[in-house]
Each structure stands twice: as structure tokens, then as C-alpha cells.
Image (spheres, rainbow, N blue to C red):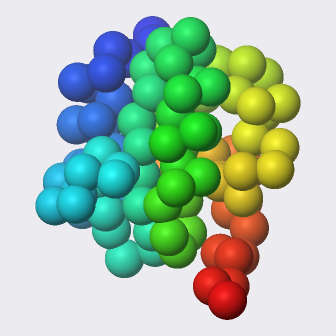
């Protein structure tokens, strides 16, 4: 499967999950299972995970499946999960942190 660009990756995940734009702007999209940030280029993964750390609830990074190894190490400690363009979970999201 060919790698998708940012717009195509966003369109694909919206079609699968029914996600809508995040009105707060903290994430790119929101859906019933959490917040989504879309990153098509592996160069953007570090910034995407940093952005996700500030989001409450379940967090997901949507990537092209072929780039899993580039994203997996960066996900450590973020509690964010990773999904591909088809909505398949490549790495499960951890439970959200409790606010004190």
C-alpha cells in the first residue's frame, strides 16, 4: 500500500472512525474512543507525541502502517496509542492519567 499524505491520512481515518475536528484545537480530531493527532511524515512524530501529552483522555497517533518502527520508540511514556490509516490499532493506548 502506498503511503498517504497528511490530507489523505486524515480523510481515511475520518472515514473509518467518524471522527470530527477537535473544536479546542488540542488534537486534530475527536471521536468516541479519544483524541487523534494525524502525522503522515515520520519527521513529525516527535512533535505529535509532545502535542498528545497535553491532551486529556485516550490519545491516538494516526500514521502510515509502514512507519510503525519510526513511531513506536517515540511513543514510550506518552500513554498514546498508534493507529494506521484503516483504524487498526498498532499499539494500544494506555489508560489516561488521573487528575489530582
Residue 73 percent location from the top left of the image = 83, 30
Residue 81 percent location from the top left of the image = 65, 53
Residue 38 percent location from the top left of the image = 40, 36
Above or below: residue 83 compared with residue 9: below
Single out the residue that lies furthest toward the front: 100
Query: At 37% from the left edge and 17% from the top edge, which residue is drawn?
Result: 4
Query: At 58% from the left edge and 39% from the top edge, which residue is drawn?
Result: 50
Q: Nearer the viewer, residue 94 or 68?
A: 94
Q: Nearer the viewer, residue 85 or 74?
A: 74
Q: How many marks?
A: 0
Quarter-of-image position of residue 95: bottom right
Q: Nearer the viewer, residue 97 or 62?
A: 97
Q: The C terminus is located in which quarter?
A: bottom right
Above or below: residue 62 compared with residue 7: below
Query: At 44% from the left edge and 20% from the top edge, which residue is drawn?
Result: 40
Task: Say whether residue 86 is visible.
Answer: no
Task: Say whether residue 41 is visible.
Answer: yes
- Tell whether 89 sits left or right of 5: right
Above or below: residue 15 compared with residue 49: below
- Tell whether 27 sits left or right of 74: left
Query: At 22% from the left edge and 60% from the top edge, which residue is drawn?
Result: 24
Above or below: residue 18 compared with residue 73: below
Residue 63 percent location from the top left of the image = 52, 31
Quarter-of-image position of residue 31: bottom left
- Tell whether 19 sits left or right of 33: left
- Tell whether 3 sits left or right of 79: left
Amino acid at each position: 500500500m502506498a503511503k498517504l499524505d497528511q490530507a489523505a491520512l486524515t480523510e481515511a481515518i475520518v472515514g473509518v472512525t467518524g471522527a470530527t475536528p477537535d473544536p479546542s484545537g488540542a488534537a486534530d480530531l475527536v471521536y468516541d474512543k479519544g483524541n487523534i493527532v494525524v502525522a503522515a511524515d515520520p519527521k513529525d512524530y516527535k512533535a505529535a507525541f509532545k502535542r498528545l501529552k497535553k491532551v486529556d483522555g485516550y490519545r491516538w497517533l494516526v500514521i502510515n502502517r509502514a512507519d510503525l518502527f519510526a513511531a513506536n520508540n517515540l511513543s514510550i511514556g506518552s500513554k498514546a496509542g498508534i493507529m494506521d490509516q484503516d483504524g487498526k490499532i498498532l499499539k494500544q493506548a494506555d489508560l489516561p492519567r488521573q487528575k489530582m
